[in-house]
């Protein structure tokens, strides 16, 4: 096929789309089902209507091949576990009794049965449920969901492409099931898994699928020869099947590296590659292997993870280069649009000038369609779109919103000394113990307490003008009083004010910093029914006035026990925002760090002796390839120290991380030089405590003993058992007792019961210590 005919064949597609609906109808329906207000049929009807609405919207926008199977009630990796029959033994009975309830039990747990472990999807803030596998795992095909959703789309007269998590990525994401040897490699199950994928592919073909997409994002990471050999075998065997649709193997989030020649040679009909700046090397690598003769290439030239308008001229140049490297070139976003909000036009409070710079999912589909048209019909067919795009890009580049000379001068004056505490940890620890007078195994929480319906109503009433600021603040004070009183009665040692005034741990601060924009409808799924509104970092960052001092000081006035000041760290402020792409991330991180440093210093001046600067995103933002990690970790850890290093030795600095794999960043955790770190550990059975011990981590740590992402209440005995496991790795004088994460999403009844049990567990284990009084 010539370049001209390849261009003529170009069409627009996407790999996935936001699931929640314009008004987060899916969240409301699922949570209504959990509470018994919505029955299963009504939930399924809501889900089906949301899928139809998405497909119609995509088709009307000009997307010529829509995805199916990307929709999920909770998580697409959990859906894959159901598809291949990898149901943990402890959940089989509930799944067999009721498939829907059993599905949610795997995701959330029950009072009697623990859920699957949850962790971050590569370097995003989306969380997936980790498959549990072992040498006795028996896979069985269940393609009902995938087939039904394909048939729904075909019934609408659409061209549809089912999307599945690929078999290699699925196994690489899995962990040994509880009770299985820690060194068990799930990838050894590949030959057992492939026949199940073959059966699913056959079912999809019979249902009308011409193409099926198999997502293999794990192959963009550094992979061993054995893992690359597994990919070779997987696609050799699947490609050799006779009863199958055409296969499109998709990668995203980075360059494929050594996996590219493996997939280019595989007997599959197409590849989907990321061609954004994060994966620019894919272009040269594709040329180096001789392209994809006779195959389809889907080019991800629109960034599926940020919200800035695409540079259409630049993307067209990339697409033009690709025309000679494949039999057919189609146009897509770099990954599923699950990671961006739905529609920028819903935002009424963002200045029209700035709104021109933004592209959410609907706007990105329009960009994809425009690029496909320009590739197929020439730039003359999209002159108006190109002119508008150039104007939007120029408006942003030349806007004074993006640059503050005072901020840049301050960042330029930073020295190495600014990012170092005045005394080493050993001296600080002695000063802090004398100052705080805490017992062994001190108890605390991570920061937030339940955000009740009354609090949400109060915020809505304030926004709507139904109450004034004074009335709202009285409501917040009453909530803080209740939280402090509860913690004192429960017996916690270091208290928190509960964060009643905060809508979100990033958005709350972003709304008070210059350079940030807040959205009203920019919801993005984090996990299950948990959605966040990442703020938009559009310009240089500074702090006009204190943000947390007032409420922390008020809480401290209610109790003689120490109350932690609570801040979100600079890396997480970036990771959970849509960051600017016009300067290095490290430069932006230093701006945020200096603004937060002012807040830390003001908290200390106001009498706060314990200050927690949360960095749950430190591991999440770790580059997928090892070669890129040292540079990232250097600026990320420096930004944390720049935030915290200006305090006195007897002020105790805490940090917190959750729901990620920590083993490969233990040195970076050490480099933060925090006095205390709390980490998720309940679902992973204290794995992080062992990792810290193996590293020789010298500071205090609180591996969580209460999984807050499940509604179940852990017993005192269960928490004590986890605490004893923690003591096997961390000595009592350096071990804290705390939940895995904040309690914002939990209800008060389960929170009270769980924290009562947590404190009881700490007291019980303290009594067992030889040094206990």
Image (spheres, rainbow, N blue to C red):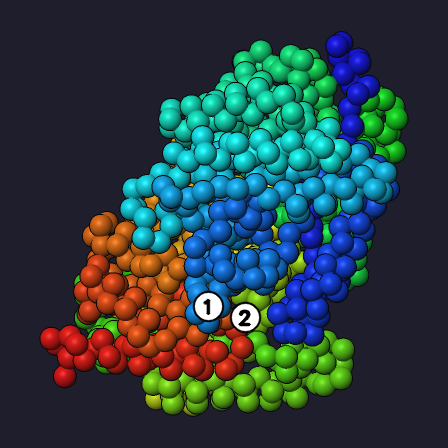
Q: Secondary structure at mark 2?
A: loop
Q: Quadrant of residue 444?
A: bottom left
The C terminus sits in image quarter: bottom left
Q: Residue at x 49, y 47 (%)?
A: 86
Q: Residue at x 25, y 80 (%)?
A: 763
Q: Quadrant of residue 477?
A: bottom right
Query: Mark 2 or mark 1, which has the lower sequence index?
Result: 1
Proximity of marks 2 and 1: CB atoms separated by less than 8 Å: yes
**Residue 449 appears anywhere in the view:** yes
Front residue (pair 175, 286): 175
The residue at the far top in this view is 2
In the rendered image, the vertical position of residue 583 relative to residue 591, given as above or below: above
Q: Horizontal placement of 494 versus 156: left or right?
A: left
In the rendered image, the vertical position of residue 395 relative to residue 735, given as above or below: above
Q: Horizontal placement of 557 versus 59: left or right?
A: left
- Residue 545 percent location from the top left of the image: 55, 70
Front residue (pair 521, 518): 521
**What's the distance in space between the residues labelled 2 and 1, CA to CA?**
8 Å
Q: Residue at x 59, y 79 (%)?
A: 452
- Residue 41 percent location from the top left of the image: 73, 63
Q: Secondary structure at mark 1?
A: loop
Q: Quadrant of residue 747?
A: bottom right
Q: Which residue is mark 1?
A: 708
Q: Horizontal placement of 196 versus 496: left or right?
A: right
- Residue 27 percent location from the top left of the image: 67, 63
Q: Which residue is mark 2?
A: 745
- Residue 589 percent location from the top left of the image: 49, 51
**Residue 282 appears anywhere in the view:** no
Front residue (pair 180, 631): 180
């Amino acid at each position: 096929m010539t370049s001209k005919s390849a261009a003529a064949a170009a069409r627009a597609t996407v790999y996935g789309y936001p699931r929640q609906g314009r008004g987060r109808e899916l969240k409301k329906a699922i949570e209504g089902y959990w509470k018994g207000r919505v029955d299963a049929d009504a939930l399924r009807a809501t889900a089906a209507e949301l899928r139809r609405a998405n497909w119609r919207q995509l088709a009307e926008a000009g997307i010529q091949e829509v995805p199916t199977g990307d929709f999920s009630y909770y998580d697409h990796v959990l859906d894959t576990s159901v598809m291949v029959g990898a149901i943990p033994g402890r959940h089989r009975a509930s799944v067999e009794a009721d498939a829907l309830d059993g599905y949610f039990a795997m995701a959330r747990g029950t009072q009697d049965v623990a859920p699957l472990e949850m962790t971050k999807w590569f370097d995003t803030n989306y969380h997936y449920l980790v498959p549990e596998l072992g040498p006795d795992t028996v896979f069985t095909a269940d393609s009902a969901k995938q087939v039904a959703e394909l048939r729904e789309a075909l019934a609408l007269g659409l061209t549809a492409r089912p999307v599945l998590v690929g078999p290699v990525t699925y196994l690489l994401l899995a962990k040994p099931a509880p009770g299985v040897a820690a060194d068990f490699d799930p990838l050894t199950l590949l030959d057992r898994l492939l026949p199940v994928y073959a059966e699913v592919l056959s079912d999809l073909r019979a249902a009308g699928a011409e193409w099926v997409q198999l997502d293999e994002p794990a192959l963009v990471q550094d992979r061993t020869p054995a893992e690359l050999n597994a990919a070779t075998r997987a696609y050799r065997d699947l490609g050799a099947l006779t009863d199958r649709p055409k296969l499109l193997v998709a990668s995203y989030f980075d360059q494929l590296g050594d996996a590219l020649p493996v997939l280019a040679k595989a007997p599959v009909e197409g590849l989907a590659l990321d061609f954004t700046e994060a994966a620019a090397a894919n272009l040269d690598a594709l040329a180096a292997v001789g392209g994809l003769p006779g195959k389809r290439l889907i080019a991800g030239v629109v960034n599926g993870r940020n919200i800035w308008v695409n540079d259409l001229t630049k993307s067209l140049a990339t697409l033009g280069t690709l025309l000679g490297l494949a039999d057919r070139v189609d146009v897509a976003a770099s990954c599923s649009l699950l990671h961006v909000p739905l529609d920028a036009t819903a935002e009424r409070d963002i200045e029209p000038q700035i709104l021109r710079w933004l592209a959410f999912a609907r706007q990105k589909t329009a960009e994809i369609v425009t690029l496909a048209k320009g590739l197929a019909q020439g730039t003359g067919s999209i002159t108006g779109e190109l002119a508008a795009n150039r104007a939007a890009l120029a408006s942003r580049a030349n806007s004074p919103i993006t640059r503050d000379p005072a901020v840049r001068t301050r960042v330029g004056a930073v020295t190495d000394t600014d990012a170092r505490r005045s005394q080493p940890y050993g001296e600080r620890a002695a000063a802090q113990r004398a100052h705080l007078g805490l017992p062994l195994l001190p108890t605390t929480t991570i920061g937030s307490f339940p955000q009740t319906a009354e609090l949400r109503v109060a915020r809505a009433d304030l926004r709507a003008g139904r109450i004034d600021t004074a009335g709202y603040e009285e409501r917040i004070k009453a909530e803080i009083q209740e939280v402090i009183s509860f913690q004192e009665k429960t017996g916690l040692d270091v208290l928190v004010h509960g964060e009643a005034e905060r809508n979100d741990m990033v958005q709350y601060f972003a709304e008070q910093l210059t350079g940030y924009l807040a959205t009203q409808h920019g919801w993005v799924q984090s996990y299950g029914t948990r959605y966040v509104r990442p703020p938009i970092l559009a310009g240089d960052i500074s702090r006009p006035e204190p943000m947390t001092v007032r409420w922390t000081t008020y809480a401290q006035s209610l109790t003689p026990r120490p109350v932690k000041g609570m801040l979100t760290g600079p890396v997480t402020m970036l990771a959970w925002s849509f960051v600017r792409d016009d300067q290095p991330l490290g430069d932006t991180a230093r701006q945020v760090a200096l603004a937060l440093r002012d807040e830390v210093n003001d908290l200390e001046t106001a009498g706060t002796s314990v200050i927690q600067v949360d960095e749950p995103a430190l591991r999440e933002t770790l580059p997928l390839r090892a070669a890129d990690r040292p540079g990232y970790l250097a600026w990320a850890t420096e930004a944390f120290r720049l935030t915290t290093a200006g305090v006195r030795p007897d002020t105790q600095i805490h940090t917190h991380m959750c729901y990620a794999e920590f083993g490969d960043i233990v040195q970076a955790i050490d480099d933060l030089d925090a006095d205390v770190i709390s980490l998720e550990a309940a679902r992973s059975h204290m794995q992080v405590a062992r990792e810290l011990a193996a590293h020789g981590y010298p500071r205090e740590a609180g591996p969580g003993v209460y999984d807050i992402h499940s509604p179940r209440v852990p017993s005192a005995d269960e928490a004590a058992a986890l605490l004893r496991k923690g003591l096997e790795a961390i000595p009592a004088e350096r071990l804290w007792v705390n939940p895995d994460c904040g309690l914002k999403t939990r209800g008060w009844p389960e929170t009270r019961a769980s924290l009562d049990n947590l404190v009881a567990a700490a007291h019980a284990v303290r009594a067992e210590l030889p040094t206990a009084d």
